[in-house]
Image (tube, rainbow, N blue to C red):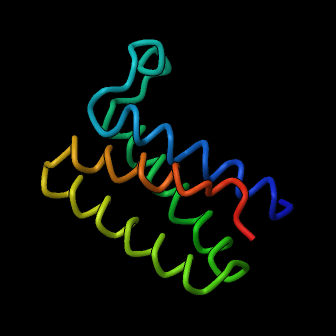
């Protein structure tokens, strides 16, 4: 997948996590037979995989900052601090991740 598409998908996944994860997914998403936990795990995995592809192609300073924020976000979710995790995800999204260079 081209770099720009990876960035766009990464941004979409981050905003989805920022709005829904891990326990606020809309009911229409649950109609596909997945639990909120399964959807969150899938979103988290996709974020991690995309980030691995993206981070080696962008500014090192920006990469380190986003990497730190991602770690804080996943730690917050792991600790049950869902609102904090969502807030961090939105902070990452607002860093204009879809236009990183």
Q: Residue at x 69, y 78 (%)?
A: 58
| x and y percentages locating residue 14 in the rendered image | 50, 48
Q: Residue at x 23, y 52 (%)?
A: 77
Q: How many marks?
A: 0
Residue nearest the observer in this picture, 39 or 70: 70
Q: Residue at x 33, y 32 (%)?
A: 36
Q: Is residue 101 placed above or below 41 in the rendered structure? A: below
Q: Is 40 left or right of 99, judged from the image as shown?
A: left
Q: Is residue 36 placed above or below 49 in the rendered structure? A: above
| x and y percentages locating residue 48 in the rendered image | 51, 64
| Residue furthest to the bottom | 60
Quadrant location of residue 97? bottom right
| x and y percentages locating residue 9 in the rendered image | 67, 48
Q: Is residue 31 placed above or below 84 in the rendered structure? A: above
Q: Residue at x 48, y 81 (%)?
A: 64
Quadrant location of residue 17? top left
Q: Which image quadrant: the N terminus?
A: bottom right
């Amino acid at each position: 997948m081209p770099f720009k598409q990876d960035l766009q998908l990464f941004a979409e996944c981050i905003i989805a996590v920022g709005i829904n994860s891990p326990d606020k997914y809309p009911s229409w998403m649950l109609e596909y037979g997945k639990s909120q936990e399964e959807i969150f795990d899938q979103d988290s995995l996709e974020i991690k995989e995309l980030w691995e592809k993206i981070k080696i192609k962008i500014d090192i300073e920006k990469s380190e900052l986003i990497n730190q924020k991602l770690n804080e976000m996943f730690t917050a979710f792991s600790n049950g601090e869902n609102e904090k995790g969502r807030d961090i995800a939105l902070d990452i999204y607002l860093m204009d991740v879809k236009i990183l260079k």
